[in-house]
Image (spheres, grey):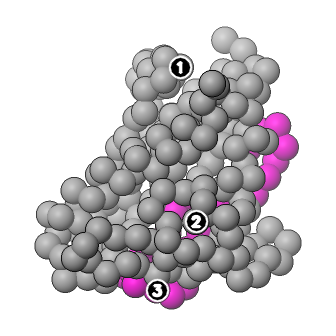
């Protein structure tokens, strides 16, 4: 196993919170063949879990990163974003405002987040955010990109989000929406890099 494969497998172990190397190897094999894997993780003090999704995109992380880095472009690069604006950028810190397009009869949801962008070229790209105001009780998460193969031509994408809207919608509907939204967001990102 190469050093990049070992590092990716170790990251999978940490992400999935499992100690079984064989499970990580099976997960890696699924990702390698194109599977999108989703899990959820309990969040202390919240009735809603953090959703975690991972997949591999057949593109280098340096090509994917600009889509995640430029929150002002989310209206055209991300799914269900009605309006997006980068408010400011100071070094690796970015403040963004996003309006999420919700299906009728629900109102659209606004959020302002502060994100920290960490880039270690050739190794890891991370956008981690926390909501500072908006129509959510909580909205935090991260996008992480790491090379999936030795050449860096394939990228492991890990998306984590814990978002609970301030809304009178029944919990069951919120849970269903969260379960469907995560895979759709990941597939939408992957579709931007499909070879034609």
What residue is shown with label 3?
134
Disc 3 from disc 1: Cα separation: 37 Å
Q: Is residue 1 above or below residue 104?
A: above
Disc 2 from disc 1: Cα separation: 30 Å
Assess whether residue 134 is covered by the magenta stretch: yes
Disc 3 from disc 2: Cα separation: 17 Å
Reading the chain from its start, which is encountered first: label 3 or label 1? Answer: 1
Judged by its main secondary structure, the magenta piece is strand
Q: What residue is rendered at 40% in x and 79% in y?
A: 109
**Tag 1 secondary structure:** helix
- The image's mark for residue 75 is 2
Q: What residue is rendered at 76% in x and 20% in y?
A: 150
- Which of discs 3 and 2 lies nearer the camera? The answer is 2
Residue 188 locus on image (x, y percent):
50, 45
What segment is highlighted magenta in the picture?
118-142
- The image's mark for residue 32 is 1
Residue 78 locus on image (x, y percent):
55, 57
Assess whether residue 194 is covered by the magenta stretch: no
Q: Is residue 102 left or right of residue 144?
A: left
The quarter of the image holding the N terminus is: top right
At label 3, counting other C-alpha atoms closer than 10 Å, the crowd grade (few under 14, some 14-19, many 20 or more) is some
Reading the chain from its start, which is encountered first: label 2 or label 1? Answer: 1
At label 1, counting other C-alpha atoms closer than 10 Å, the crowd grade (few under 14, some 14-19, many 20 or more) is some
């Amino acid at each position: 196993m190469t050093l990049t494969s070992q590092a990716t497998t170790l990251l999978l172990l940490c992400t999935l919170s499992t100690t079984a190397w064989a499970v990580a190897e099976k997960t890696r094999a699924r990702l390698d063949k194109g599977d999108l894997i989703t899990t959820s993780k309990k969040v202390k003090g919240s009735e809603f879990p953090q959703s975690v999704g991972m997949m591999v995109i057949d593109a280098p992380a340096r090509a994917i990163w600009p889509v995640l880095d430029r929150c002002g472009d989310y209206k055209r690069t991300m799914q269900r974003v009605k309006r997006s604006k980068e408010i400011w950028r100071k070094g690796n810190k970015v403040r963004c405002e996003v309006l999420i397009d919700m299906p009728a009869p629900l109102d659209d949801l606004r959020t302002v987040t502060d994100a920290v962008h960490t880039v270690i070229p050739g190794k890891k790209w991370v956008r981690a955010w926390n909501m500072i105001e908006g129509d959510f009780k909580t909205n935090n998460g991260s996008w992480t990109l790491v090379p999936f193969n030795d050449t860096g031509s394939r990228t492991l994408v890990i998306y984590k989000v814990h978002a609970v809207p301030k809304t009178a919608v029944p919990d069951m509907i919120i849970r269903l929406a969260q379960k469907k939204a995560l895979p759709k967001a990941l597939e939408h990102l992957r579709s931007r890099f499909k070879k034609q």
